[in-house]
Image (tube, helix red, strand yellow):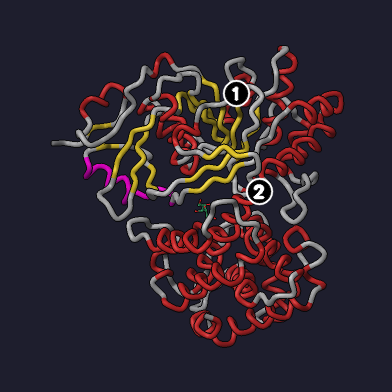
């Protein structure tokens, strides 16, 4: 049978095993505007919401907006917004076509259309997956970065913003002007205390941009925190080919793992979909879940990404095939991180650790170390530096975490052990590279220069020899003995 090009008209011709939306999509209203239409949203929140729609509650269609590039809209529009989620694990792959995203917008093409969508009376929630750097905050303190070029721009052009923060503000302003209640802001990014962080950033932006509205926003807008978890590598042409083999021509399918978790603080003044019926955990306090996930999963992920990339491993699964590297992250998760956590009630940390190791080993996913290594300046504070501070407060040693930090320092020099260039993607890449070039291959000079970047390390860590000495030692060892021997010695 020749493969079917995905669209509403062709759903009935898809291979029998493929799940597709059976609800009346034309009747669905959009109750959610989502900012940041990347692969993660499409494999996570959109899948939970799809089940809500399929259960007959049609008030929760999604308008998805890309804040930068038209690529997603261009791929999805010809297929009526439909795309396939392919779940890959030990069992045969499972394919589900998702219909929850009813419309895709491209913010820079028409900012007014996005603001109007947010100010529509059917909309109750604006959710976000704009990555860590999308919040235009200072990662070390969580405060709005008022000098960020997008923030400067958005303060000057409130009706044609660029940043997610500028759009949230514009959407709220338009709602108030129409006499509507504010939407709930639902952040789904891997930030510490993510709801509080976006609240702090937006409230400050409101004070600067519209002081008359700032108090109302501070009093009325809800910012529930969430913990989101699903491993979603970026899609490749090889993935598209796999889909075609399976009988579906899809311009932008999503590959993911069987595991999915969503813990949500239950605070939605205008209501919410019944996500809890489909596996989401609605709780009063997300913080213990979020911290555990950011430190155990993401902390280990970043460590594996830098050490793995530098050791020549392209994917996380390949890096986990290196016994010393696997042992290192396992010990990080068993010895170093747990003492820094408040364990959520009912959680067995050892079982959680085992399941993370198994997920990292999933050979059916090609999750590139380079992808995870991206934006380290925005990720390190919550993944490795938070645990480091807690370990210091408890008087414990932190050698493995220091090695993770040193591996990031080695990585941002932009040159690997074979003299090959590394494509370092980071909002601070240029500054990091300049510091690395000035320091040369001198571990101590490089470590001290990078530790002085206050937006990452704050004012405290660079002053504390219990942190700086092990980082310098690890970085010196990475330069003198190389990555593999250093990992071997540490593991
Ligand atoms: C990863 C995360 O790219 C990264 O930084 O650590 O995207 C990770 O895969 C997800 O948080 C898993 O839920």
Asked if residue 460 lies left or right of residue 166, the reply is right
Q: Which image quadrant is residue 375 in?
A: bottom right
Q: Where's residue 376, x and y in %?
A: 61, 60
Label 2: few (<14), some or many (≥20) within 10 Å?
many
Range shown magenta: 233-246
**Mark found first going from the N terminus, 2 or 1:** 1
Q: Which residue is rendered at x = 13% and y = 36% of the image?
A: 1
* Tag 2 residue: 287
Q: Where's residue 386, x and y in %?
A: 69, 61
Helix, strand or loop for disc 1: loop
The verdict on label 1 being within 8 Å of ligand 1 is no
- Main SS of residues in magenta: helix
Q: How many marks?
A: 2
Instruction: Tell whether position 240 is magenta.
Output: yes
Instruction: Report the disc number at residue 271.
Output: 1
Task: Work out whether residue 91 or residue 322 is closer to the camera in this orientation and state it.
Answer: 91
């Amino acid at each position: 049978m020749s493969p079917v090009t995905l669209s509403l008209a062709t759903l009935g011709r898809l291979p029998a095993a493929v799940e597709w939306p059976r609800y009346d999509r034309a009747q669905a209203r959009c109750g959610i505007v989502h900012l940041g239409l990347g692969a993660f949203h499409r494999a996570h929140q959109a899948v939970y919401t799809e089940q809500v729609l399929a259960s007959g509650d049609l008030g929760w269609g999604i308008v998805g907006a890309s804040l930068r590039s038209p690529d997603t809209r261009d791929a999805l529009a010809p297929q009526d917004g439909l795309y396939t989620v392919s779940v890959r694990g030990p069992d045969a792959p499972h394919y589900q076509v998702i219909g929850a995203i009813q419309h895709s917008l491209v913010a820079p093409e028409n900012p007014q259309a996005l603001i109007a969508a947010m100010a529509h009376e059917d909309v109750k929630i604006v959710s976000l997956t704009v990555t860590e750097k999308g919040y235009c905050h200072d990662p070390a303190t969580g405060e709005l970065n008022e000098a960020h070029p997008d923030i400067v721009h958005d303060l000057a052009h409130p009706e044609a913003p660029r940043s997610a923060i500028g759009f949230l503000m514009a959407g709220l302003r338009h709602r108030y002007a129409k006499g509507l209640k504010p939407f709930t802001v639902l952040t789904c990014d891997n930030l510490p205390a993510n709801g509080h962080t976006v609240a702090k950033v937006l409230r400050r932006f409101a004070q600067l941009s519209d002081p008359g509205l700032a108090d109302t926003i501070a009093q009325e807008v809800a910012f529930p925190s969430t913990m989101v978890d699903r491993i979603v590598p970026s899609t490749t042409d090889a993935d598209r080919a796999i889909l075609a083999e399976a009988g579906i021509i899809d311009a932008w399918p999503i590959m993911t793992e069987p595991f999915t978790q969503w813990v949500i603080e239950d605070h939605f003044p205008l209501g919410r979909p019944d996500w809890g019926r489909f596996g989401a955990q609605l709780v009063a306090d997300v913080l213990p879940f979020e911290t555990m996930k950011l430190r155990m999963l993401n902390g280990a992920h970043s460590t594996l990404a830098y050490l793995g990339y530098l050791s020549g491993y392209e994917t996380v699964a390949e890096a986990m095939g290196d016994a010393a590297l696997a042992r290192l992250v396992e010990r990080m998760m068993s010895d170093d991180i747990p003492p820094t956590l408040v364990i959520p009630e009912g959680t067995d940390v050892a079982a959680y650790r085992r399941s993370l190791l198994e997920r990292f080993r999933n050979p059916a996913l090609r999750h590139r170390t380079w992808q995870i290594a991206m934006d380290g300046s925005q990720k390190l504070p919550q993944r490795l530096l938070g645990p480091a501070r807690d370990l210091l407060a408890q008087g414990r040693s932190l050698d493995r975490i220091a090695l993770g930090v040193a591996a990031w320092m080695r990585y941002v020099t932009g040159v690997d052990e074979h003299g090959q260039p590394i494509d370092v993607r980071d909002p601070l890449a240029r500054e990091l590279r300049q510091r690395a070039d000035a320091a040369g291959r001198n571990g101590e000079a490089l470590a001290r220069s990078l530790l002085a970047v206050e937006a990452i390390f704050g004012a405290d860590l660079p002053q504390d020899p219990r942190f700086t000495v092990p980082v310098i030692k690890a970085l010196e060892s990475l330069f003198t003995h190389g990555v593999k021997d250093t990992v071997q010695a540490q593991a």
